[in-house]
Image (cartoon, coloured by chain):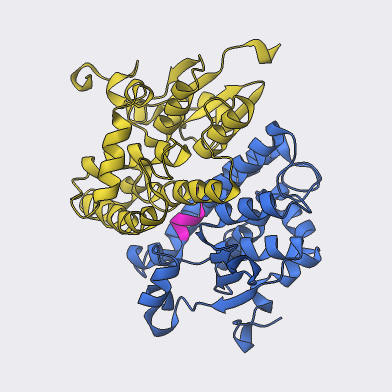
Chain colours: A blue, B yellow
Amino acid sequence: MSVLLKPVLYSYFRSSCSWRVRIALALKGIEYDLVPVNLIKDGGQQLGSDYRKVNPMQQVPALTIDGLKLSQSLAIIQYLDETRPTPRLLPQDPKKRAQVRMISDHIVSGIQPLQNLAVLKQVGEEKMVSWAQHYITRGFQALEQLLQDTAGKYCVEDEVSMADLCLVPQVYNAERFKVDLTPYPTITRINQALLELEAFKQAHPSRQPDTPPEMRA
Amino acid sequence: MSVLLKPVLYSYFRSSCSWRVRIALALKGIEYDLVPVNLIKDGGQQLGSDYRKVNPMQQVPALTIDGLKLSQSLAIIQYLDETRPTPRLLPQDPKKRAQVRMISDHIVSGIQPLQNLAVLKQVGEEKMVSWAQHYITRGFQALEQLLQDTAGKYCVEDEVSMADLCLVPQVYNAERFKVDLTPYPTITRINQALLELEAFKQAHPSRQPDTPPEMRA
């Protein structure tokens, strides 16, 4: 029975979308097998015909679980939350759930797709960094504003939520592209608080099975 | 009491993200006031300081409802579905819900952000069309594949869902950018079935208060 098999996560250590799902799995204590998909090696292992059967979009992450083949990080996280509800990643109050989804989508649709590896290749070596900085900056200006209405200790009040799973990997990307974070004190404060949590540490790119030795923490 | 006020939708007739929310409102029979935000006129009315207070990301749609100020189409649609559940836009079965969200996110994060107006401006006049075609084609190849596992009459079996609200506006964009749709018979068939439904007709860009006379149906 496929439901008795351990879930399998297809992941790349530095992929921010994979990282979101790794945090969810860690927070919920779900055991899984990890299949590394190297986005650089062999011209991109996600482009091979084997992986295409797992995720036709040829992106990570993908998760096989309960006989399902899922891609898209937020769809995966919400499935995990609906079927393995402890600890919950969306609040009970519909208004707060809406805020969690708004912030998550803001990052997942509004920022990340415009600075991912495949798009930056398309943009070209020369403009790559300024392009990524432009979209992250624009997104963070708005995010800092949104958080004024929603944040407590974390993105939406004091409970860790799906929004926080999106925030931390996006801040890591901002740092990679040397975006100045001083104008975003709320983003920075929440990111630091989250990085203290064990699940966020476990899921970090510096501690994955496919992390290259020189990048290990 | 703010909860007694009619919801206000900030929308642009041709914005595919606004259109998704208009379909949800129409399907659920929710009355609302519409504030048109012209993305072209005055250098883009979404960039003005007034609208920035509604949505700091300076994009449409936004919805004020029940005392909340929401942006991001899927966050809005899911809030509507959780608070006004008839007819439901996410199935009851968690596995099917996951498939609806996967297809929705595939379009909303994987395709639309890469071919929206602001990004195409950044890409430049010369490359604009080929850029948009590239990302829509890549997304539709994967989507056609995903639908083989999920589709019935609509994207996920035979009930209209959030995924369908994302599909129709994305096909419209594909047509605007003259993407050849013949390789995508499932996408095309579902799109046609959906366009027959009254809510999809009402929400169409050709029938909005801000539709210019020459584009009215």
Quadrant where the C terminus of chain A lies? bottom right
Residue B49 can be seen in this image:
no
Where residue B145 sits, quadrant-wise, is bottom left
- The quadrant of the image that shows the N terminus of chain A is bottom right
Residue depicted at x 62% and y 31%: B82
Task: Name which quarter of the figure residue B80 lies in.
Answer: top right
Q: Is residue A123 magenta?
A: no
**Residue A175 x/y as whole percent:** 60, 64
User: For this view, does B94 lie left or right of residue B175?
Assistant: right
Foreground of the two, A28 or A167: A28
Q: Which residues are magenta?
A: A110-115
Q: Residue at x 56, y 57 (%)?
A: A73
Image spot of residue B133 (x, y percent): 25, 53
The residue at the point 56 percent across, 78 percent down is A35
Give above or below for B53 relative to A176: above
Q: How many marks?
A: 0
Say left or right for B6 vs B149: right
